[in-house]
Image: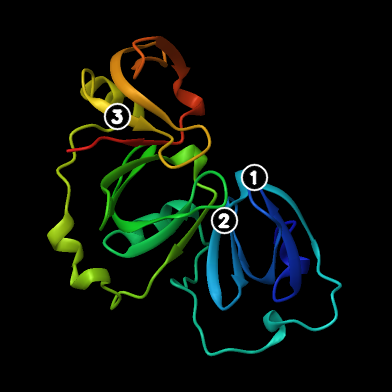
Amino acid sequence: MNEFTPYLSEKVVVEISGNRPKHGKLIEAGTDLLVLLHQQRYYYIPITHLHSLKADLRAGSDDDKDINLTPFIKQEEQISLEKILQNAKGLFVEISVCGNKPIHGYLNEVMTDYLILHSPIYNTIYIALDHLKWLIPYPSSYAPFALTAESVMVNVRTNTFAELFQAEKGNKVAIDWSSPSERLGVIKCMSNNIVELIEIDGSSALLHLAHIHTLYVPR
């Protein structure tokens, strides 16, 4: 039993970092992860980004209806973020990182502190695990543009997000791609978790790695 047990199978309102509150049914609660049924989809939400959870006192909603859906993974042992990510490898997923615009793609690999996602449109996107707000896995049969997970595999070269920036030194990148904080430029160097980026106008910007959500490297 944990603090969320009284809310299991109940309608709740969940407030997550950077997102509007979500109304739904709390399906499962682990030590570091919540599973919320919201608008007939399962949201896997890291507790570290949970701002608040309370009973939903609204009268009647679509979330009240019983639907024939099963969670992405059902385990007798306690659910966790690590288990969900490992089981989602190779699947097409929807991920929220910052703002209200999610990222879609195949989850190719789970590294020490970042994820490798392959987007059918934008190719490879690297996502800092600390900034993962929620994950929605699609059914294994889902194949956008008739692509398969095997056809979009990426060769893994680095174990950590910091090593990734070191490896991409000298390359053109988009940091926090497609978000209000997006920055475009060339990585000059990375030291002590500080990234030096040469921006389009030639100016230099120092960025702390802990506040970088995603890295996109055009190929």
Q: Which residue is mark 2?
A: 45
User: Residue at the location (72% across, 84% down)?
Assistant: 64
Q: Quadrant of the N terminus?
A: bottom right
Eyeballing the image, is 190 above or below 2?
Answer: above
Q: Which residue is mark 3?
A: 173
Residue placed most toward the observer, 157 or 61? 61
Q: Amino acid at mark 1?
A: Ser
Real-space CA distance between mark 1 and mark 3, rounded to the nearest whole angstrom: 25 Å
The x, y position of residue 213, in whole percent, is 46, 36
- Residue 17 is labelled as 1
The x, y position of residue 35, in whole percent, is 58, 65
Crowding around mark 2 (Cα neighbors within 10 Å: few <14, some 14 to 19, many 20+) is many
Q: Earlier in the sequence, mark 1 or mark 2?
A: 1
Q: Are marks 1 and 3 in contact (CB under 8 Å)?
A: no
Eyeballing the image, is 39 above or below 219?
Answer: below
Judging from the image, what secondary structure is the residue with disc 2 in? strand
Real-space CA distance between mark 2 and mark 3, rounded to the nearest whole angstrom: 28 Å
Residue placed most toward the observer, 143 or 53? 143
Eyeballing the image, is 29 above or below 27?
Answer: above
Q: Nearer the viewer, mark 1 or mark 2?
A: 1
**Could you tell whether 4 is left or right of 42 in the image?**
right
Q: Amino acid at mark 2?
A: Ile
- Residue 26 is labelled as none
**Could you tell whether 114 is left or right of 52 in the image?**
left
Q: Nearer the viewer, mark 2 or mark 3?
A: 3
Q: Nearer the viewer, mark 1 or mark 3?
A: 3
Colour scheme in the image? rainbow
Q: Earlier in the sequence, mark 1 or mark 3?
A: 1
Residue placed most toward the observer, 76 or 154? 154
Q: Are marks 2 and 3 in contact (CB under 8 Å)?
A: no
